[in-house]
Amino acid sequence: MTDLHPFIAGLPKAELHVHHVGSASPRIVSELAARHPSSKVPTDPEALADYFDFTDFAHFIDVYLSVVDLLRTPEDVRLLTFEIARDMARQNIRYAELTITPFSSTRRGIPEDAFMEAIEDARKSAEAEFGVVLRWCFDIPGEAGLEAADETLRLAVDVRPEGLVSFGLGGPEIGVPRPQFKPHFERAVAEGLHSVPHAGETTGPGTVWDALKELRAERIGHGISSAQDAELMAYLAENRIPLEVCPTSNIATRAVTDIELHPIRTLVSAGVLVTVNSDDPPMFGTDLNNEYAVAARLLELDERGVAGLAKGAVEASFLDQAGKDRLNNEIDTYTAQWLAK
Ligand SMILES: [Zn+2]
């Protein structure tokens, strides 16, 4: 089999499921830690590499929270966001919908207007400097309950930044039933935001049905347990509701025990529009290019197949039609040139 890594690395791509704090690479964390010497986070790259070597899921949560703790000023937020775009540009990601949990920062005392200004400034600078188009998904941290949901909705609707396109729900699924957030999603959708809750990552297909019926999901974060329900897969396929699949994340969180048993094949065979994403890339030791390589291997794709995967993400994105046409053209041109070599 040909090595697809060089092809994937240069392929223009869109990413639809990637978290803001979860995208803080050791390089970025080191910069943030240097701004706050009182934090316990190491600044030395070698020590940071050890710091990012997770022993278990609880350790991952500790590190994640320590990065949240490094976001103390609007400038920290701006730096993180802008530097994420730099990392994306290096992977030839042209467009990304970045999931941000504004509640984590506003609750910690960053003024909401300054927070919005920071991400918007980063978005505009990243587009000008790196050619990476960023859009936001504001998500409810499900474990923080209805208070967090109310606040996230308020930030999304009343303090809405220009780049916001969607409304999400993250955190654990177990013990956090989706239907309790129905009023929040109804309001967000009424305000023109797209509904993109996480569902069916660590719980069964019933959670995906809840997301569809109660939260009016237009795309599902993960949704891999849909593979256990033929009727659900048929519904997703027929209504062209995409899944945001993150293979390495599923292994890291043990949602899937073995990558060879990943349901991505079943989902694709059933005609579901599957997109490939990285979730919390440096924290799971991956990036989008690696996720494409994993998916290509599992789905036995060649270059054209991988390009098809990239175009599926464009279709599933909330880009306008002109933006979709432009990115699809880039993908087609790149692939044609590659195959003519
Ligand atoms: Zn996620």
Image (cartoon, rainbow, N blue to C red):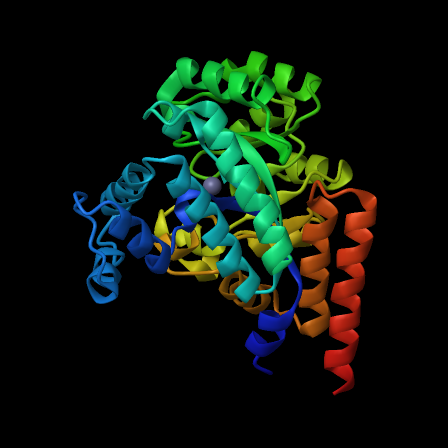
Q: Position of residue 113 (x, y in %)?
A: 49, 25
Q: Position of residue 132 (x, y in %)?
A: 62, 55
| Direction bottom: furthest residue | 341
Left or right, 74 with reference to 305: left
Residue at image location 59% in from the left, 29% down from the top: 161
Residue at image location 78% in from the left, 85% down from the top: 340
Q: Quadrant of residue 233?
A: top right
Q: Position of residue 139 (x, y in %)?
A: 50, 30
Q: Quadrant of the C terminus?
A: bottom right
Left or right, 298 with reference to 80: right
Q: Quadrant of the N terminus?
A: bottom right
Q: Nearer the viewer, residue 170 or 49?
A: 49
| Tally of numbered discs | 0
Q: Nearer the viewer, residue 195 or 260?
A: 195
Q: Nearer the viewer, residue 118 or 271?
A: 118
Residue at image location 21% in from the left, 49% down from the top: 41
In this view, 105 is above or below 338: above
Q: Confirm whether residue 199 shows in the render.
A: no
Q: Confirm whether residue 252 shows in the render.
A: yes
Residue at image location 36% in from the left, 25% down from the top: 143
Left or right, 4 with reference to 144: right
